Amino acid sequence: MHMSSNKRVWLFQEGNAGMRDLLGGKGANLAEMTNIGLPVPPGFTITTEVCNEYYTNGKVLPAGLMDEVRAAIGTVEAAMGRTFGDPEDPLLVSVRSGAKFSMPGMMDTILNLGLTDQTIEGLIARTGNARFAYDAYRRLIMMYSDVVMDVPKEQYEHLFTELKKQLGVTQDTEVGADDLKRLCEEFKAHTRANSGRDFPQDVNLQLEGAIEAVFRSWMNDRACVYRKSEDIADDLGTAVNVQSMVFGNTGDDSGTGVAFTRSPATGEKTLYGEFLMNAQGEDVVAGIRTPMDIKVLSDMNAAVYAEFVEIAKVLEQHYREMQDIEFTIENGRLYILQCRAGKRTGTAAVKIAVDMVHEGLITREEAISGRITPKSLQQTMFPQFTEKPKDQILAKGMNAGPGAASGQIVLSSADAIRLAEEDPNAALILVREETNPDDLAGMLASRAVLTSRGGRTSHAALVARQFGIPTICGCDDISIDHRARTISAHGVTLKEGDWISIDGTEGIVYTGQLPSEAPKVSAEVGELLQWADDIRSLGVWANADTPEQAADALAKGAEGIGLCRTEHMFLGDRVPLVRKLILADTEDARQHALDQLLPLQRKDFVDIFRVMQGRPVTIRLIDPPLHEFLPKESDLLVEVTRLECADPNDARLSELRRMLDAVQSMHEANPMLGLRGCRLSIYMPGIVQMQVAAIIGAACEVQKAGTRVHPEIMIPLVGHVNELKWIKDRLEKTAQDTMKSEGVTVDYMFGTMIEIPRAALTAAEIASETTFFSFGTNDLTQMTYGISRDDAGRFMKLYVDENILPGDPTESIDRDGVGRLMSMCVNDARAANPSLQIGICGEHGGDPSSIEFCHSLGMNYVSCSPKRVPIARLAAAQANLAKADRDK
């Protein structure tokens, strides 16, 4: 629930973890950490409501806000024993954003605020370190000019690089105090020349400008791209956190770092992170210097390391969650700057959740509902390389994002986006020195990411873990030549467009394309899904057309087959027989073709029934129009014309002409709404009679061998109850005759797909004539919207981008339109036939949001492709827990 408050500025000690809506995730955490007694530098938070007020006011800070801010600064001054703007001993602050949901790298941050030409003298006097003070000042001028005054940070970095070249040094730390002082003057002149304004020397103006810039950054491009990719609403707003600065770069007894209480890559229960001595926080995250492993800290300062280990334990126990902790050591004293639930790979998410259940920190229900997303479970199913030839190893780096991918080298995000738009199936690997938040769209367009700089907590690593992109960071063997558009390592040079393979689990880069295989599911995944099965009430079945697919579905936990498409059994080497059937010009010729197909179809069903071992199997009778089994008219025309010109006596001509005549006579303006499904069964009943004889015959055969079989025969595309009656009467006779001749009784049933809106609207009539319904939401969505899935691609992206539609209705059920039809259908059908079984077999059956909707309608099962079965099991359990929560 969103707390509304007249109070716009909250000191850390006044808030708590439950105030994320108002104080943002970061502010709420800082408040909570302060209240559990951790060494947090004091500060305050300006609420998310002020951000929304800022935009409502036409991007103007609300009246009186800065008076409240100055009062809060007074409290912080008292706690730190320093004064904001004091030339003798100045208080410096950081200004950071903090939305309700963590948005790493998306929002702008300003450090060292409060430094001016006057106050810097006080900082030098306090620390006795002029080099550190001018380093802090040049960082402030650069960040402030970039974020508040719109002069790009890169220009300042270029000026700094030029200075280092002049001095003949490479490291930032080699530049002395006098040169940094000169650089600060250069920076201020650059700001004046490029913005028309001076860098402010009034600390209160600095603070006001920074607060406003954080609010402005809520709507910057990269923040909007991130929110869209994560489904975060634009109107949540961001809070602003103003916090006392503590410094990790005051000398060799100071440092800064980022650590996770467990490995965010594997979930292993061990401290995972890195730090740099004599550095500020951004140095670790930006990936400019390569940091040291957190465990090395125990050798350098055992007392601080022991204190940190204890704090990590306290935080995990308190939040009952794996934590990502930013810390600074100032002159040997440890400060915790912030903590948040750590981003993690899918593999780590599952292991951490299962381990925490075993440790008694959380319940099974919490593990299922709050710790694992369907997306993170999907990541545990990442491919791995089957061959890893040593002679193809190009370089090694840090394993930042697990999984394996091969692709073509692309050296810029803009090119990755362009190539992916030109060919959505393009296999691309983005290779950069380091990534920044502006690279997000390019990273999402790529199969994998490789950076030559940065560590496991850099931006690239963070994005990799969140979006499941195989990634290697800090691969400093690689050098990139942007002019020549090449990358090279160990004497090997590759061009943009050449193939490489990334093993993000091991951190190894290979040349060329390597074969990969699906991952082996960990014991933790199996255990988690077992808990999900215990919790869910919705059945999870699979769409499978072959014994191999059926076996795969069972291995992934499916409880039945919700859709077996019989037309897929007419492909391959059976196409000539099917064409014989279609081209038959007498009833005898057609029956002869059907007689040849019958034993083949029967064997198909025998094989599937054997695999399914008595579990339900729903078989859809032939659905597509017959011309789909014939060549395209244009191809036939070309071939007939070619042969007529080359050899008019060619024996193949008469067959091809017959086929061309058949295709032309069957031509339909709109095949999706034409002679298919039950209409074809009424027009040419012999095909479905053969299929039912094959299904029931196969069931009898398997049952004789000792396995009970439960075939569910599904009649597609029914729009009127009389269609169902007409077909069912004839097929019941075929079923009875087959059982009689086999001398076996099989437990079979007839049902129908609900995919035409009229069927949903007349569900009561249809339900009284059948035993099960299965929603074919692919077609139901197309017919409800009047769109063709094959053609909607042209405009659907535009509709979603322009917010004309909230999402693509072919991916997730449109609850207001298609969902309303489904709801009416379920209610009317169950009223007429309370024992009616209802499921869904469109691809929506594997979409978590659609699964939740199906659960809310009281359906019996969802059915989806085998690879989505584990996700459906989890989503069904989450739906049950969410409903139980709502019902409390």
Image (spheres, grey):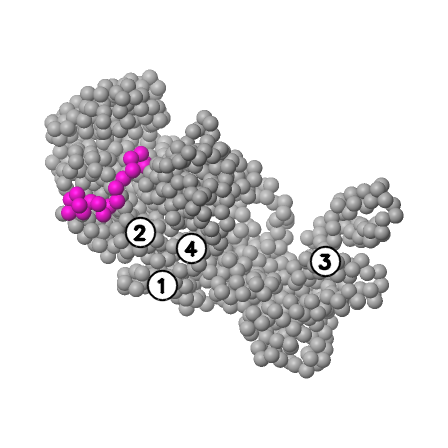
**In the depicted view, which residue is nearer to us: 125 or 278?**
278
Residue with the mark numbered 2:
263
| Sequence-first tag of 2 and 1 | 2
Q: Quickly name the residue at label 3.
A: 575
Quick check: can you spot residue 451? yes
Task: Please tell me whether residue 617 belongs to the stretch shown in magenta.
Answer: no
Residue drawn at 17 percent across, 22 percent down: 118
Residue 67, image x, y percentages: 22, 33
Q: Residues within 10 Å of mark 4 (few under 14, many from 20)?
A: many
Image position of 467 with respect to 370: above or below: above
Q: Residues within 10 Å of mark 3 (few under 14, many from 20)?
A: some
Sequence order check, earlier mark of 3 and 2: 2
Residue 613 in picture, x, y percent from top left: 55, 73
SS at mark 3 in the image = helix
Amino acid carrying mark 3 in the image = Val
**Number of residues whose C-alpha sits closer than 10 Å to that of mark 1, classed few (under 14), some (14–19) or many (20 or more):** some
Taking the spot 36% from the left edge, 39% from the top edge, the residue there is 475
**Region rendered in magenta:** 286-302
Nearest-to-viewer mark from 2 and 1: 2
Q: CB of mark 4 within 8 Å of CB of mark 3?
A: no
Q: Kindly state the secondary structure of the residue where label 2 is placed.
A: loop
Q: Position of residue 283 (x, y in %)?
A: 28, 35
The residue positioned farthest toward the right in the image shown: 649
* Image-quadrant location for residue 147: top left
For residue 609, side relative to residue 351 (left or right): right
Q: CA distance from mark 3 to mark 2?
A: 54 Å
Judging by the rendered image, the residue that carries numbered circle 1 is 365
Task: Judge whether residue 824 can be spotted in this image.
Answer: no
Give the labeled residue for mark 4.
Answer: 380
The amino acid at mark 1 is Glu
Could you tell me which secondary element the residue under label 4 belongs to? Answer: loop
